[in-house]
Image: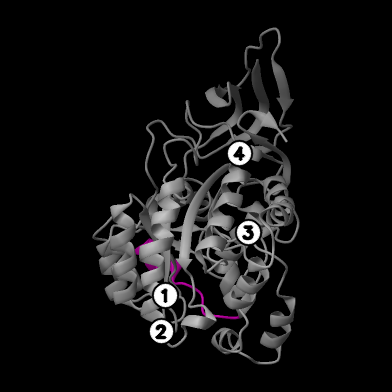
């Protein structure tokens, strides 16, 4: 049976030839069709065009009523599998403590690690499932989920098994990332290289043996993993076929971006501290700069220099960083709003950043992120609006009318 969407006010971004990403000036000019229709078949986009659509017996017909149709959001950086919550740390932040001070007091990542270590795999899945349903209803059709709140072999494996189960249970696309190098556990504070050895010699082989992750990530930043430690982990992971993604330059000019480029990272994420040297490095490779404005907003930190990156000809992706401590939201409509309000991005740039460029950051750009025949029919139908810029402009309220995952209305 075909799903036919008719009376589409604007269908975008439409591609004549599929691209891996959209960069520089091209980010501000997505192609689209007005007064359009789209047909999905067997979970994929079959065809689309302008004007009247020819219907067949048995078609399931949706009337967009002049609303826009865009690809479902591709959120390429989340930590949405976690136990408990950390709202007390938000209070501490209001009282003046920095992210690093909260971490030194046993808060932050280590707080989430303690909670997760005392939570069973089943309970962890049951706590995470409502968050997955929530982001789907808010339009996310593909999501990367990281481990990193386990910090022991057993608990990192537990997290990754839950991530795999989410991908098997829900209709959105799930990409899994091993982030054992998220922080140093309490028992390794005086022996950080000992923990790096644990990640390399025990965690990575265990993850690879069960094929639990697509990517490996390291928090390469001030107060966390050094460039040297990061390099050791990425080299060991590469031997097991894990592609790098890096938490880089959130807290300082850490060398994380250059390290990610050296090891062929699919994306480098955060990037609040990005200067000319980092931009030069990024222009020499095919790594996606991924910005997380929800984190800067929630923590009151500097914003990443989106305008410098785009104006230099680079692509940019935006992701939610959904996690319990520094960005407790997976609302990609709000991330779009932060893109224009805080990062000074144009509406069309924001649209590409949360669709095709986000898909590239996850390695799924051939199947997600744009309107093209054969791509997955995970789509958003908006309420009628004057232009795509209205969606991030009208912040705080959802303009999503319907969400479709792989050709099925959810």
Q: In this orientation, does residue 247 appear?
A: no
Q: Is the residue under label 3 in contact with that under label 2 (CB below 8 Å)?
A: no
Q: 35 or 225, which is in the foreground? A: 225
Image: magenta residue range: 300-311
Of the residues under marks 1 and 3, which one precedes in the sequence?
A: 3
Tag 3 secondary structure: loop
Q: Position of residue 166 (x, y in %)?
A: 63, 45
Q: CA distance from mark 4 to mark 3?
A: 16 Å
Q: Position of residue 287 (x, y in %)?
A: 34, 57
The residue that label 1 is drawn on is 195
- Locate the N terminus and report the quarter of the image it occupies: top right
Query: Which label sits in the foreground, 1 or 3?
Result: 1
Q: Is the residue under label 4 in contact with that under label 2 (CB below 8 Å)?
A: no
The residue that label 2 is drawn on is 191
The residue that label 4 is drawn on is 168
Q: Is residue 240 above or below residue 172?
A: below
**Does the magenta run of residues contain 306?**
yes
Q: CA distance from mark 2 to mark 4?
A: 38 Å
Q: CA distance from mark 1 to mark 3?
A: 24 Å
Q: CA distance from mark 2 to mark 3?
A: 29 Å
């Amino acid at each position: 049976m075909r799903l036919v969407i008719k009376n589409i006010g604007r269908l975008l971004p439409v591609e004549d030839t599929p691209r891996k990403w959209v960069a520089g000036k091209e980010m501000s000019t997505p192609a689209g069709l007005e007064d359009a229709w789209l047909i999905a078949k067997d979970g994929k986009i079959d065809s689309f065009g302008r004007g009247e659509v020819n219907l067949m017996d048995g078609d399931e017909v949706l009337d967009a009523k002049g609303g826009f149709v865009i690809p479902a959001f591709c959120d390429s950086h989340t930590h949405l599998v976690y136990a408990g919550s950390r709202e007390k740390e938000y209070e501490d932040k209001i009282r003046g403590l920095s992210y690093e001070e909260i971490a030194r007091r046993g808060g932050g990542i280590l707080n989430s690690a303690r909670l997760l270590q005392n939570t069973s795999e089943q309970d962890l899945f049951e706590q995470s499932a409502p968050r997955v349903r929530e982001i789907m209803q808010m339009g996310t059709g593909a999501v990367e989920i990281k481990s990193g709140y386990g910090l022991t072999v057993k608990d990192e494996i537990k997290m990754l098994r839950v991530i795999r189960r989410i991908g098997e249970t829900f209709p959105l696309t799930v990409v899994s990332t091993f982030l054992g190098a998220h922080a140093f556990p309490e028992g390794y504070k005086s022996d950080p290289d000992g923990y790096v050895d644990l990640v390399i010699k025990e965690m990575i082989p265990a993850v690879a043996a069960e094929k639990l992750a697509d990517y490996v990530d390291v928090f390469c930043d001030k107060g966390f993993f050094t460039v040297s430690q990061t390099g050791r982990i990425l080299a060991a992971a590469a031997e097991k076929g894990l592609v790098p993604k890096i938490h880089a330059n959130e807290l300082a000019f850490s060398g994380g971006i250059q390290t990610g480029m050296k090891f062929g990272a699919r994306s480098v994420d955060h990037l609040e501290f990005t200067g000319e040297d980092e931009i030069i490095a990024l222009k020499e490779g095919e790594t996606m700069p991924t910005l997380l404005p929800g984190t800067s907003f929630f923590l009151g930190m500097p914003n990443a220099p989106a305008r410098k990156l785009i104006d230099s000809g680079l692509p940019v992706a935006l992701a939610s960083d959904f996690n319990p401590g520094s960005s407790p939201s997976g609302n990609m409509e709000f991330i779009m709003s932060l893109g224009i309000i805080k990062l000074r991005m144009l509406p069309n740039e924001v649209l590409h950043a949360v669709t095709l460029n986000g898909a590239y950051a996850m390695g799924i750009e051939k199947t997600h992120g744009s309107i093209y025949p054969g791509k997955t029919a995970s789509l958003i139908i908006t309420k009628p609006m004057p232009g795509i810029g209205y969606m991030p402009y009208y912040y705080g309220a959802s303009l999503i009318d319907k969400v479709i995952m792989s050709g099925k209305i959810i």
